[in-house]
Amino acid sequence: MNAQVLSSADRTRALEVFVAIAEAGSFSAAGRQLGITPSAVSRTVHRIEQRLGVRLVLRTTRSLTLTAEGRAYLQAARRIISDLDDTEQAIADLGAPQGRLRVSAAQSHGRLCVVPLLKEFAARYPHILVDISLSDAVVDIAAGQADVAIRFGPLPDSSFNARRLGDNRRVIVASPDYLARHGTPQIPHDLHSHNCLNFNFRRAEPTWPFRDEGRDYALSVSGNVEANNGETLGQLATAGVGVTRVGAFSVAAEIADGRLVTLLEAYNPGDREEVNAVFIGGAHMPARVRVFIDFLADRLRHR
């Protein structure tokens, strides 16, 4: 049978059957998955091999193995099916963005800054299912763990797209109770006599940046508690455990009502961290991803 005899639909179905065989590990299991008989699966593979003139599958009574040509065909089949799915979704999105949108955000920033925006987004785009996960772990976008990841700090060079959502201003804070008991630091070096609460990230160094008379420097600090998010550090500082340096968004309410006091602002070197939305762009980027990033960029910029 030559390639011209098969319709586009037949060839797409053949690709789906071949992928199912490789993933299920047998003709019978693939048949059950697809709702067809094992003999129909076998005939499909035979037709592909006959058309290509190569053996794709080595089959015994107990196992199924792909040849080198079979592995190459499987890789191409998966890519074609994925491209077709993305294209169909993009076309469907022309009417109204729809489908599952997987979002990853850091715990504190997600809870305080992103989740409060979802009510408005859900009302505007009712056909998008927002699947949000809050974690300080870095997800693998390439492996499909998220469509959009909101990340802090410098981004490594990669093939991903990034859109800047804003800046995270960092502040040093302590509670009035703590300061009454331990004194208020007047210059950065006074922190050496204070309990400084830090992040426990690998990338987080136990130094805080300062600027004095135009000179930038990093001061080593230490304390007896570390945490993986700014909200927890802010809570500890509010309880009078020590002094901490966190994103202003995570302690904005506590500063506003006086439960925390900002310190050493005259020595703040413009301590900020970029906030970016990271995603896979390109011609086939689903509309649901695009509208979500546009929405975030607009709302977070105004915040």
Image (tube, rainbow, N blue to C red):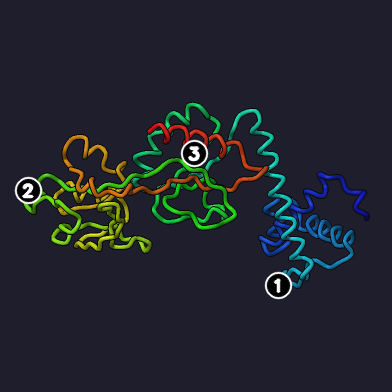
Residue at image point 36% right, 44% down = 168
Q: Amino acid at mark 2?
A: Ala
| Disc with the residue nearer the chain's start (3 vs 2) | 3
| Disc with the residue nearer the chain's start (2 vs 1) | 1
Residue 149, percent across and down?
A: 48, 48
Residue 264, percent across and down?
A: 20, 48
Crowding near pointer 3: few (<14 within 10 Å), some, many (20+)? some
User: From the image, which quarter does the C terminus lie in?
Assistant: top left
The span from disc 3 to disc 2 (Cα, nearest Å) is 46 Å
Residue 135, percent across and down?
A: 40, 51
Instruction: For mark 1, give the secondary structure.
Output: loop
Mark 3 or mark 2: which is in front? 2
User: To which residue does mark 2 refer?
Assistant: 180
User: To which residue does mark 3 refer?
Assistant: 130
Residue at image point 28% right, 57% down = 208
| Disc with the residue nearer the chain's start (1 vs 3) | 1
Residue at image point 65% right, 45% down = 282
Instruction: For mark 2, give the secondary structure.
Output: helix
The span from disc 2 to disc 1 (Cα, nearest Å) is 76 Å
User: To which residue does mark 1 refer?
Assistant: 62
Which of the 4 quarters of the picture holds residue 86?
A: top right
Which of the pair 145/225 is nearer the observer? 225
Query: Seen from this angle, which residue lies furthest left?
Result: 181
The span from disc 1 to disc 3 (Cα, nearest Å) is 43 Å
Asked if residue 25 lies left or right of residue 280, the reply is right
Instruction: For mark 3, give the secondary structure.
Output: strand
Q: Amino acid at mark 1?
A: Arg
Crowding near pointer 1: few (<14 within 10 Å), some, many (20+)? few
